[in-house]
RNA sequence: UGGGGAUUCGUCUAGUGGUAGGACAGCAGACUCUGGAUCUGUAUGCCGAGGUUCGAAUCCUCGAUCCCCAGCCA
């Protein structure tokens, strides 16, 4: 296949694939993404998807989607549906190559019969506890099962009756006859089939025996003609077993290559732990915007392109590495800066009255939608005598290097006028509740004809035109870099991972904001309308903050 | 002497016998109607010890550290 595209990627997998093509070991490239439908996809899966689909695409090959649904008690159709939606959202397509390990149950059964006939598999009556005891330990060999030497006929009979449902759960297993003294514990007569009287989400009650993942995975790859079976590091120990099955059954052998799964700082990625966050109510669900799931990222406003770019940025290797979440954040900002239209929103409002602005007058000022994209055009923003500005943009006593509004100082209202603070109104407790300012009519649009400069430009919203909104500012879910390292990861939760600002005001153009459309609230961060948002009650999620060099200056004193 | 893997800036990642490069993070500065973006500059690294070689991150030897495996989970 000399005319197929050849990746220029230099990671070790692409290098191996290229060598396989060059040597003729394979003449095409076929990979697969094999999730178990027992949970939601998260950012770690996005890396795997990027590797599986990406490498296939690089070499002009194909990538199958196959659900490894060999355990009916854990798997559900709901997960199947959500996983497919997430992969499509990420931007990958398996065309008509959607498969299920359960599609192969009959074939797998026949493979098992073949192994029994070859004297390579036997029915074992040991209980789970007994089997554990017979298995030995990491440093001591195991012992042969007393049932290991049953005749082929007896094994065939028993296995047939297992399938027929004659035996209760857990009473018997079908095991491969390999080597109880093997250093690799996976080779110590591993279980191939177990009895589970449970309804499978696809095969219903057709089966009461189910293949173990290890007895299904390699053969499924073989059946599909997968050339490169890419998986995570913990399956390195299983590769000899997959090779053994495929060899003993006598079928086509794919090549398995293992790579390191994603570990992200300030994040937890185990399904078990994510499930606990949901079950214990620490988040609102699998798509709570603080979760590392793809559905959560989507809801939060993270573009799929940012996740794809992130995956490309981190590369693929065998090092067990901890990726700094700042790299993900960089990929998100980078994409959002390119595509998000800018709007003004005041999150913590402070009322401002322009004393010399005519009562009842309204002007419409032109604002740029996206300075990074001229094609995004402009919009009109209404201006009037009473405005809201950000509380943080005023300090009665300014700290050093503070450029924003302060008594007597002139600043620019973005796209509008220069204003100067002439008076500060406080309530009985001394809190600032209103600013009295004057504006310079000559600075309309934001530039002074006399050439004078201001050090700061702040955003604003006209009070009579402002649309009230709830703003949800999300932050990292965990306060420690490696929550997995704690005795209990729940103690590492960041108590400030969500800040709800119920009294925000946004400019009128935002009244019709749609979920999924990214917006930059100028000087605040990137936001998008939440699923909870309705025309009558706007709700915005903060996707990510803008970089804030003032915060850095201020924190240094 | 159980088996399997890994080790390059703070964090990732290239480099496959010939000047250790890139990204993120950091620091300093320029510019700016977002203290955003952009631009410039800058410090920091081959796990260790021997050996082979004119020359070693790369080859050899010995060692250290870390990760995975004892589900009828995947």
Image: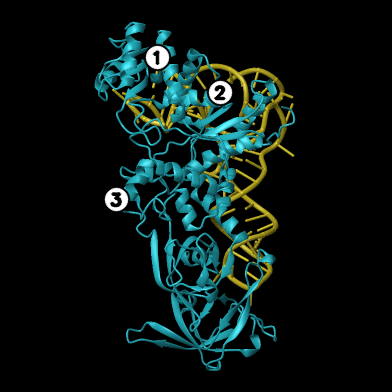
In the image: residue A450, left or right of residue A520:
right
In the rendered image, the vertical position of residue A469 relative to residue A373, given as above or below: below
Q: Nearer the viewer, mark 1 or mark 3?
A: 3
| Residues packed near mark 1 inside 10 Å, few (<14), some (14 to 19) or many (20 plus) | some
Residue B7: x %, y % from top left = 53, 33
Which residue is label 3 attached to?
A280
The numbered disc on residue A91 is none
- Kindly state the secondary structure of the residue where label 1 is placed: loop
Dots 2 and 3: beta carbons under 8 Å? no
In the rendered image of the structure, the colour used to display chain B is yellow
Please give the residue where the numbered disc 1 appears in the rendered image: A182
Q: Chain of mark 3?
A: A
State how far apart marks 2 and 1 are (Cα).
24 Å
Residue A418: image quadrant is bottom right
**In the image shown, does B22 or A182 lie closer to the viewer?**
A182
**What residue sits 31% from the left and 27% below the top?**
A196
Colour scheme in use? by chain
CA–CA distance between discs 2 and 3? 42 Å
Instruction: Give yes or no for contact between labels 2 and 1 (Cβ–Cβ under 8 Å).
Output: no
**Letter of the cyan chain:** A
Taking the spot 66% from the left edge, 33% from the top edge, the residue there is A59
Residue under numbered circle 2: A254
Above or below for B51 versus A64: above
The answer to whether residue A17 is seen in the rendering is: yes
Picture quadrant of residue A410: bottom right
Sequence-wise, the earlier of marks 1 and 3 is 1
Host chain of mark 2: A
Element class at badge 2: loop
């Amino acid at each position: 296949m000399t005319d197929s595209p050849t990746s220029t990627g230099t990671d070790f997998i692409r290098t191996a694939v290229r060598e396989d093509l060059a040597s003729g070991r394979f003449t095409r490239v076929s990979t697969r993404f094999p999730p178990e439908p027992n949970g939601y996809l998260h950012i770690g899966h996005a890396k795997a998807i990027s590797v599986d689909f990406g490498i296939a695409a690089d070499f002009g090959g194909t990538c199958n989607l196959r659900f490894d649904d060999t355990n009916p008690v854990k798997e559900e159709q709901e997960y199947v549906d959500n996983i497919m939606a997430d992969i499509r959202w990420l931007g990958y397509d398996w065309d008509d190559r959607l498969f299920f390990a359960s599609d192969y149950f009959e074939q797998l059964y026949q493979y098992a019969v073949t192994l029994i006939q070859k004297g390579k598999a036997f029915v074992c009556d040991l209980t789970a506890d007994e089997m554990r005891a017979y298995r030995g330990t990491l440093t001591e060999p195991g012992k042969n099962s007393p049932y290991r030497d049953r005749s082929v006929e007896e094994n065939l009979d028993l296995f047939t009756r297992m399938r027929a449902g004659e035996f209760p759960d857990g009473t018997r297993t079908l095991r491969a006859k390999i080597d109880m003294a093997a250093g690799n514990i996976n080779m110590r007569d591993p279980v191939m089939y177990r009895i589970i009287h449970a309804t499978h989400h696809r095969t219903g009650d057709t089966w009461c025996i189910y293949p173990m993942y290890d007895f299904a995975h390699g053969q499924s790859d073989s059946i599909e003609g997968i050339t490169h079976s890419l998986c995570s590091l913990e399956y390195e120990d299983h590769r000899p077993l997959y090779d053994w099955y495929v060899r003993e059954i006598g079928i086509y052998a794919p090549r398995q290559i293992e790579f390191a799964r994603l570990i992200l700082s300030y994040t937890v990625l185990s399904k078990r732990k994510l499930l606990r966050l949901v079950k214990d109510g620490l988040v609102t669900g699998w798509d709570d915007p603080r979760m590392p799931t793809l559905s959560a990222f989507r809801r939060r406003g993270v573009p799929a392109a940012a996740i794809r770019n992130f995956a490309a940025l981190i590369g693929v290797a065998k090092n067990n590495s901890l990726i700094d979440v700042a790299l993900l954040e960089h990929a998100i900002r980078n994409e959002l800066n390119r595509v998000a239209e800018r709007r003004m929103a005041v999150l913590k409002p402070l009322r401002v009255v322009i004393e010399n602005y005519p009562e009842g007058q309204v002007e419409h000022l032109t604002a740029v939608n996206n300075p990074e994209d001229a094609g995004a055009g402009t919009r009109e923003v209404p201006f009037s005598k009473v405005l809201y500005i950000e509380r943080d943009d005023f300090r009665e006593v300014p700290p050093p290097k503070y450029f924003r509004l302060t008594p007597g100082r002139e600043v620019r209202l973005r796209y509008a006028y220069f204003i100067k603070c002439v008076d500060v109104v406080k309530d009985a407790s001394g809190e600032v509740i209103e600013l009295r300012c004057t504006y310079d009519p000559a600075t309309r649009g934001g530039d002074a004809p006399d050439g004078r400069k201001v050090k700061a430009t702040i955003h604003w919203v006209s009070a009579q035109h402002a649309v009230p909104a709830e703003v949800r500012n999300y932050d990292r879910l965990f306060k420690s870099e490696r929550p997995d390292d704690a005795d209990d990861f729940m103690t590492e939760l960041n108590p400030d991972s969500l800040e709800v600002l119920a009294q925000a005001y946004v400019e009128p153009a935002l009244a019709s904001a749609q979920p999924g459309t990214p917006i930059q609230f100028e000087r605040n961060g990137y936001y998008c309308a939440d699923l909870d948002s309705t025309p009558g009650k706007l709700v915005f999620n903060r996707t990510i903050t803008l970089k804030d060099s003032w915060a850095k200056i201020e924190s240094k004193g």
